[in-house]
Image: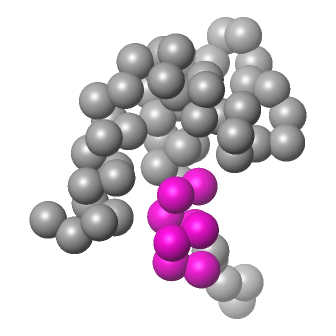
Amino acid sequence: MDDLARQIAEIEAWGRDQCLEAWDKLAEAPPGSRLSLRFLRKALIFEVRCKRLGGFRRQ
Protein backbone atom coordinates (compact mmCIF):
# COMPACT_ATOMS: atom_id res chain seq x y z
CA MET A 1 0.00 0.00 0.00
CA ASP A 2 1.47 3.36 -0.93
CA ASP A 3 1.79 6.21 1.54
CA LEU A 4 -1.31 8.09 0.34
CA ALA A 5 -3.51 4.98 0.56
CA ARG A 6 -2.15 4.28 4.04
CA GLN A 7 -2.86 7.84 5.16
CA ILE A 8 -6.42 7.65 3.81
CA ALA A 9 -7.00 4.33 5.57
CA GLU A 10 -5.81 5.87 8.84
CA ILE A 11 -8.20 8.82 8.49
CA GLU A 12 -11.10 6.46 7.74
CA ALA A 13 -10.41 4.72 11.06
CA TRP A 14 -10.25 7.92 13.14
CA GLY A 15 -12.85 8.86 15.66
CA ARG A 16 -14.47 12.28 15.98
CA ASP A 17 -11.83 13.68 18.37
CA GLN A 18 -8.97 12.76 16.03
CA CYS A 19 -10.80 14.29 13.06
CA LEU A 20 -11.47 17.52 14.95
CA GLU A 21 -7.83 17.74 16.00
CA ALA A 22 -6.68 17.25 12.40
CA TRP A 23 -9.26 19.79 11.18
CA ASP A 24 -7.79 22.39 13.55
CA LYS A 25 -4.37 21.85 11.98
CA LEU A 26 -5.58 21.97 8.37
CA ALA A 27 -8.45 24.42 8.20
CA GLU A 28 -8.58 28.16 8.70
CA ALA A 29 -11.96 28.03 10.41
CA PRO A 30 -13.37 25.75 13.10
CA PRO A 31 -15.68 22.97 11.94
CA GLY A 32 -19.40 23.39 12.36
CA SER A 33 -20.72 21.78 15.51
CA ARG A 34 -23.18 19.67 13.54
CA LEU A 35 -20.83 18.18 10.96
CA SER A 36 -21.03 14.42 10.78
CA LEU A 37 -18.02 12.22 11.34
CA ARG A 38 -18.40 10.93 7.79
CA PHE A 39 -18.24 14.47 6.39
CA LEU A 40 -15.21 15.35 8.53
CA ARG A 41 -13.36 12.27 7.27
CA LYS A 42 -14.21 13.02 3.63
CA ALA A 43 -13.09 16.64 3.99
CA LEU A 44 -9.81 15.63 5.62
CA ILE A 45 -9.14 13.02 2.94
CA PHE A 46 -9.84 15.64 0.26
CA GLU A 47 -7.32 18.01 1.87
CA VAL A 48 -4.68 15.28 2.13
CA ARG A 49 -5.16 14.36 -1.54
CA CYS A 50 -4.96 18.00 -2.66
CA LYS A 51 -1.76 18.62 -0.73
CA ARG A 52 -0.22 15.36 -1.91
CA LEU A 53 -1.27 15.51 -5.54
CA GLY A 54 -1.04 19.27 -6.04
CA GLY A 55 -4.70 20.18 -5.75
CA PHE A 56 -7.16 20.23 -8.56
CA ARG A 57 -6.78 22.17 -11.77
CA ARG A 58 -9.16 24.79 -13.06
CA GLN A 59 -10.28 24.07 -16.57
In the image, taking residue 10 as reference, residue 2 lies left or right, namely left
- Residue 1 vs 31, above or below: the answer is below
Q: Is residue 37 above or below residue 3?
A: above
Query: Residue sitting at 66 percent across and 84 percent down?
Result: 57
Which residue is depicted at the point 30% across and 41% down?
Answer: 10
Residue 58 in the image: state x and y as whole percent.
72, 84
**Residue 47 appears in which quarter of the rendering?**
bottom right
- Please give the name of the residue rendered at 85% of the width and 42% of the height, measured from the top-left corner: 28
Q: Position of residue 54 (x, y in %)?
A: 59, 80
Count the numbered circles shown: 0
In the image, what residue occupies the spot 75% across and 19% down? 32
- Mainly helix, strand or loop, the magenta region? helix
Q: Which residues are magenta?
A: 47-54
The residue furthest right is 29
Task: In the displayed orientation, state which residue is furthest to the top.
Answer: 33
Quadrant location of the C terminus in the rendered image:
bottom right
Structure colour scheme: one colour
Left or right side of 36 for 2: left
Q: Is residue 51 located in the magenta-colored stretch of the structure?
A: yes
- Residue 12 percent coordinates (x, y): 32, 36
Q: Is residue 10 left or right of residue 38?
A: left
Between 33 and 6, the residue placed more toward the observer is 6
Along the horizontal axis of the image, is 4 left or right of 52? left
Residue 43, by quadrant, is top right
